[in-house]
Image: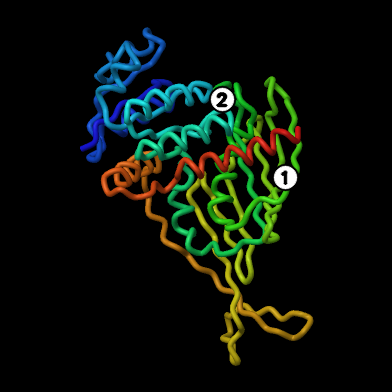
Amino acid sequence: MLKIGVLGAGHLGKIHLKLLQQSEHYDLVGFFDPDIANGQRVAKEFNYNYFESLDELIDAVDVVDIVTPTLSHYNCAIKAITKGKHIFIEKPITTTVEEAEHIRLLVSENNLRGQVGHVERFNPAFLAVKSEIKKPMFIETHRLAEFNPRGTDVPVVLDLMIHDIDIILSVVNSPVQSVQASGVSVISETPDIANARIEFENGCVANLTASRISLKNMRKSRFFQKDAYISVDFLDKKVEVVKMKNAPKHPGDYDMILQNAEGVKKQIYFKNPEISPNNAILDELESFADAITHNRKPIVTLRDGTNALRVAHQIIDCF
């Protein structure tokens, strides 16, 4: 088992602690939080080992799980890497692309492994249809959330939209050609609602909307490609796959047939991929353990996290 320590005992940090304590892939050594009062309170309530020194925790583990505010990701990661530790780092990977590139370089030079916490890659709904998404040419995403003060220290693009940016980059095998966007600050000092249009060199267009001042929560993406439409509901863990194929010469009474202006007939049919329930956060953490143990590339690499951050900043620069 890999010895792991968690940096940060906020909302998400406590979730990581709970799951890592249950994991058969890790030995949870303890955690560090710069807020001593919070650290001692969490340690007492859940019986975790609290380290009052960041360096002491890093020295005691094989893997460092960085779940601190984004502004501190870079310094925490550099300390861990220079001490020869593998790093799991929550999204967004860092504050700047330059910091992310430096982390990626150091991890490679030290023959270590790093993974970024883009958890939607492990969402069971997305996993159920990932193999069906082939060369999408139009993508539309909506990620809406009710207002929560947590996370408003960064623009909604880095708080919410970056999830969809990563998903889109993972399925569109083409460089970004151009980015257009607009954002509005309603209650925060940074934009609370944003819309972006990303055009790729292969002709694919993605239209993304993110809001943290909505009256209801929504996390939906739709993928349009030749002969197929795929919808993913990341929140309710539901999918819809509508496909088309050449119509049979003798359609059945209940077959859905469309005919275009040229007389070409297509049959519409529905696929119902099986969705296997999972805990996406636990799965991403344990997939990282597998990558370390078996010397494999992590599912969400530091390069992936850097690329998502780069596009996010291109969007923010449009505001």
The residue positioned 33% from the left and 13% from the top of the image is 53
Element under label 1? strand
Residue 36 position in % (x across, y down) = 37, 8
Residue topped by disc 1: 179
In which quarter of the view is residue 106 placed? top left
The residue positioned 65% from the left and 55% from the top of the image is 139
Query: Looking at the picture, does residue 210 appear above or below residue 184?
Result: below
The residue positioned 48% from the left and 44% from the top of the image is 120
Residue closer to the observer: 101 or 185:
101
Disc 2 or disc 1, which is closer to the eye?
A: 1
Q: Residue furthest right?
A: 261
Marks 2/1: CA–CA distance = 24 Å
Residue closer to the observer: 33 or 47:
33
Check disc 1 and give the amino acid type. Answer: Val
The residue positioned 64% from the left and 69% from the top of the image is 226
Residue 66 position in % (x across, y down) = 41, 28
In which quarter of the view is residue 205 placed? bottom right
Residue 136 position in % (x across, y down) = 62, 61
Query: Looking at the picture, does residue 209 appear above or below residue 92?
Result: below
The colour mode here is rainbow
The answer to whether residue 53 is left or right of residue 131 is left
Element under label 2? loop
The answer to whether residue 231 is left or right of residue 130 is right
Q: Residue furthest left?
A: 1
Q: Residues within 10 Å of mark 2 (few under 14, many from 20)?
A: some
Q: Earlier in the sequence, mark 2 or mark 1?
A: 2
Residue topped by disc 2: 151
The answer to whether residue 55 is left or right of residue 191 is left
Check disc 2 and give the amino acid type. Answer: Gly
